[in-house]
Image (tube, rainbow, N blue to C red):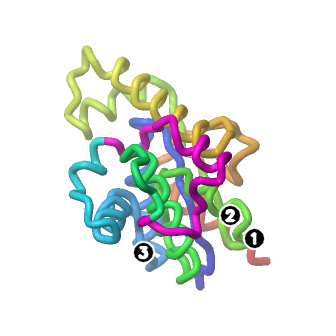
Amino acid sequence: MDNKYIITIARQFGSGGRAIGQKLAEKLGIDFYDKELISLAAKESGINPEVFESVDEKAANSLLYSLSMGLYSFSSGFSAMGDLPVNDKLYILQHKIIRDLAAKGPCVIVGRCADYILKDHDRCISVFIHANMEYRKTRAVEVHNIDKDRAEHIINRTDKSRANYYSFYSGQKWGLAENYNLCVDSSKLSEDQIVDLIISYLEIKDK
């Protein structure tokens, strides 16, 4: 199909959301962004990407105060960020980068509140990938090489971090169905089937 959409993918840890996003981008012939957003933010800011990697999708606590006090606006650029925590600097940079990427054309973007950042974009389709705990534990062990005895703890901790990040920067609840166009249980379908399902959704939107 001649895709014209930006697809954002939010995902529970261990659900395979990143792999699904990669396959979707490949099948549609469009760009894919996940960790690549960190590299782009590092390049724009001059900050070591390893510093950004350590705070990726983790909330800080000062950005909303700065915004409410008029100390920063998203249009004022990196130089206006002053002494904001690295978490906030990364979010601000990724916010700008995500909007710039969406303006350039179709792509797949994973995480980073992209669905919220692009909520007013008329060609943004937001997807949430979830699965039951047993499926995610198995995948965490087999794909992410996590110790099986710690898998559930790491899954819960990662999901909590993502939920806090999303809630802090968007003011919305992560994983709540009404915040997404499409929610899919990856334990019920294969990755390829989910890719086809999302493409079918895009084709229906076009009609």
Say whether residue 51 is left or right of residue 179: left
User: What type is the residue that disc 3 sits on?
Assistant: Asp
Give the structural element (helix, strand or loop) at label 1. helix
Start and end of the magenta stretch? 55-79
Q: Quadrant of the C terminus?
A: bottom right
Q: Please provide percent x and percent y for residue 197.
A: 60, 59
- Of label 3 and label 2, which has the lower sequence position? 3
Quadrant for residue 198, please give it.
bottom right
Q: Is residue 160 magenta?
A: no
The residue that disc 3 covers is 31
The mark that comes first in sequence, 3 or 1, is 3
Residue 41 in the image: state x and y as whole percent. Answer: 36, 64
Taking the image as drawn, is residue 54 in sight? yes
Q: Residue at x 54, y 77 (%)?
A: 106
Location of mark 2 (residue): 201
> What residue sits right under mark 1 in the picture?
205
Q: Amino acid at mark 2?
A: Tyr
Task: Say whether residue 7 is left or right of residue 179.
Answer: left
Q: Nearer the viewer, mark 3 or mark 2?
A: 3
Cα distance, mark 3 to mark 1? 21 Å
Badge 2 vs badge 1, beta-carbon distance below 8 Å: yes
